[in-house]
Each structure stands twice: as structure tokens, then as C-alpha cells.
Image (cartoon, helix red, strand yellow):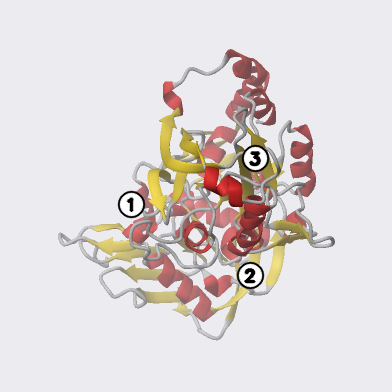
Amino acid sequence: MISSLNAAGCSAAVVGNHEFNFGLAYLRDAMRQSAFPWLSANILSAASGEAAFGTPYLIHDTPDGIRIAVLGLTTAHIPVWELPKHIEGLRFVDPVECAKRWVPYLRNKEAADVVIVAYHGGFERDLQTGVPTEKLTGENQGFALCQEVEGIDVLLTGHQHRQIESAMLNGVCVIQPGTQGQFLGRIVLELELDEEAQTASSSPEGKRSWRVVSKHAELLPAGETDPLDRILELTAPVEAGLQRWLDEPIGETVGNMRITDVLQARLEEHPFIEWINNVQMEVSGAQISCTALFDESSPGFGERISMRDILANYKFPNTLRVLRVAGRDIREALEKSASYFTLKEDGRIVVNSAFLLPKPQPYNYDMWEGVEYVLDVSRPSGERVVQLEVDGSPLLSAAEYDVVMNNYRAGGGGGFDMFRGKPVVRELQTDMAELLADYIRTKRIIKTSVNHNWKVIGGNLRQV
């Protein structure tokens, strides 16, 4: 990736949350290979208080004498998700407060004619109405940046995987180019000389002042562009090795673990989901487990299992944590998962739009093993857990239970605040995809089973 970005002439990169998934040593090695700076003004060294990865901004002077400043910012929510050892020695400060400091500096001290903020984060509110589109945790603060920080011309965003173009927010041109290289975001600015500002400003002698008079943002589909030969030549050896590794058989299944209907797999326990939960319990020693079906295209397993199959299902570099939680926390978490569904007028169960917009969140619906439960989506939200037992007896609200889950959920990710700050009984440091692969290599033969310990009812689905 770095060699490709170098060859493409990348001017700068902004640090994002997944840059930390493999630790600081790995990240800093990638940065050393980069022929461009990595920007993040709000990730500081805890020891010095300075920007942890070098300069927090980039200055570019055009041949016409236009000075462009690019300020890098990163979602400050990273400590909620990331392993502490992966961010040791770093301090994440509020992006909005950080921008309030740096944008005037870029305007006044660096004499920037154009200020661009490149933010690895998205929008917490609807761009037109300002109504919150998610819980205001600070994970996304793009709306606040545009509303509260004076002097920003352009806000480049990411993180939410949305496709946003031709949008203006409080005079700021905003864009977000999807994910996985789907689009290139292009911003076109028109400027004119500002003689009055030149006379009144403190710009360096001889520097002309420019004023932005128009802004336009658009998304260019990458799929409509032929790849560059020099990029293909750089990546070909790695790509060939990667494809061989992905297709190497590591095990087999006995029984059907294919997922053909992802909605149905979330309404009634599927053998693949039970297997994931059983693996998590076996490797962690916990008696209760929860997991999600992370993607709408998750295929499950066929007769032969390869690394490609594992990564097609488990796409995030999560690790596992065992938390000690109260019974009331489990009930609250199940109510949160039950809110994933809503009923249509014809009685059909569908996905709640809150989990589809501003981006799909299938990874925030958990399914559990080690408890028996029924969710009735015809009931009001918060009252949908109509049965909840452990070993045939009612789960006790005040009793404590050890539950294994991924580190994102254990940190309260996805709005599961009931798990935040709970005691960590055990932590497994192995990446989940690697853990699953090792498990399959050891067992070689994976037998399917499903005990139907949970179900979703309501509407056209009734208790059986």
C-alpha cells in the first residue's frame, strides 16, 4: 500500500483508527517507508504534548502564489476501541478544540489563503437539518467542525464509509468518498486576488492575498479508470502471494454452514453463528459469548475452508475479551440488539433504519450463546426480551457472569455502553481471523450444530 501511494505521488495521509490495529511499531515502520507526511494535529505525545507523528499540517504553495494549508485530524474515539498497548504514550484530544487552535494559526501565522481540514471522522448530524444521526459520543464531529470553527474552506471526511459530494455546511465544502477506493474525491476551488485583504493583512511582504469565490466537490468512480502499469508492476508479486495464501485449504466442514439469507440468519440461529460463539467460549473459557454477522455479504463456510473464507466473514482485526458483567447488563445488551429490527405494516420484520443510516451497521447486532432468550419485536423498544434464562433458570439481574466478546464491543463500541468499564477477566491478544484459522487447522474437520438457544418473534414470526 505504501509503495503504491508513493508511486501515485500522494502528498499526505491522515492517521485513522485502523492504523493502530497492529501496534505503534508496525505503524511507525509504515510511516518511515512513506515518501509523504502523516498528519494528525490532535494525536499528541503524552510526554511532550507535541504532535506525535511530526508536523500536524501541510503547506503547499502553488506557482501562482496561492498558499494552501492542510490540517490533519483524527477521531478521538480511538481509545474506546483500541488495545491500550497499541496506543501507549499517546494522548487523543478533541478535534474541534484542536481545530480552533490551529485554523487561526494557519490563517494568521502561515498566511494560508485556503485552509483544508482532512479529518478521519464523519458527521454526527444530518447535514440539512442538524438532527443527530447517532449518539453524540465524539466518534464523529464533522458537523461541529463546520459549525464551530471559523476559517475552514474545505472539510475532507472519512471513517463512516459514506458517499457525500456537492455538499455545503455553514459555508464549508464537505466531501466523503466512500470506502475501499471506490471513489476519488475532487474539490475544485476558484480564487481571485483580494487587494483589500492584501493591504490590511499581516502577510509576508510580497505575498499576494487570494479569496475563495466558489467551491465544488465531486466523486469520481475509480472503477471507470484503467489502473496504472507502474502500480500493477509494484503490487503484482505481493498480489500473487496474497492470492495463493488466501486459497490455501486449512480445513473442511461436515454439514451446511453456508449463509444464503443474512436477515434470516439474524432472526433464527444459524450453524455458522453458533460455531463462532462456541469457538470464542472454548478458547476463552467463558460460559457465555456474543458475536455479530459483520457484513451483508458474509457467506459462511462451504465444504472446504480457506483463509479467504475466514476473512470474507470476519473482516475486522478484532481480539477477544472476557468481561465480568451483571445479568442486567446482558438484558440491556439484548434490548439494544433487539432494536436492530422494526415491523412493517404488513407484519414483515425488517432492519431498523437507524442501523442503515448514515451507514449500515450489521456489526452492531449481536447473537448470544450460553443463554436462552426470545426477542419479540412486536413489543416496544426496551421491552422486547420476553425470555432470558441460563441453564433453564431465569437470569438474575444482580448476578455476575463472564462473557466473551470482541474488543470493540467490550469497549462499549456500537452504543453498548453497559459494557464500558467492566472488569476484564481475560484478554486474548491474537487477531480473531488468525485465531479462527489456527482453530480450524488444529481441528481440521468442523462439524456443524445448532441448538436454537435463541429466536426472534413478532409480526409474521410467532413463538413455536
Mark 3 Cα shell of 10 Å, populated few (<14), some (14-19), many (≥20): some
Q: Position of residue 448 (x, y in %)?
A: 48, 47
Quarter-of-image position of residue 438: top right
Residue placed most toward the observer, 80 or 342: 80
Q: Nearer the viewer, mark 1 or mark 3?
A: 3
Quarter-of-image position of residue 299: top left
- Secondary structure category for the residue under label 2: strand
Mark 2 Cα shell of 10 Å, populated few (<14), some (14-19), many (≥20): many
The disc at residue 264 is 1
The three-letter amino acid code for the residue at tag 1 is Gln
Q: Residue at x 21, y 64 (%)?
A: 459
Relative horizontal placement of residue 381, taking residue 67 as reference (left or right): left
Residue 85's place in the image compared with 234, above or below, is below
Q: Residue furthest right?
A: 47
First in residue order: circle 1 vs circle 3 = 3
- Res 316 seen here: no
Mark 1 Cα shell of 10 Å, populated few (<14), some (14-19), many (≥20): few
First in residue order: circle 2 vs circle 1 = 1
Residue occupied by mark 3 = 13
Residue occupied by mark 2 = 323
- Secondary structure category for the residue under label 1: helix
Residue 425's place in the image compared with 300, above or below, is below
State which quarter of the image contains the N terminus. Answer: top right
What is the spatial separation of the Cα atoms under label 2 and label 1, in whole angstroms? 29 Å
- Marks 1/3 in contact by CB < 8 Å: the verdict is no
The three-letter amino acid code for the residue at tag 3 is Ala
Q: Position of residue 296 (x, y in %)?
A: 40, 45
Q: Position of residue 293 (x, y in %)?
A: 46, 51
- Secondary structure category for the residue under label 3: strand
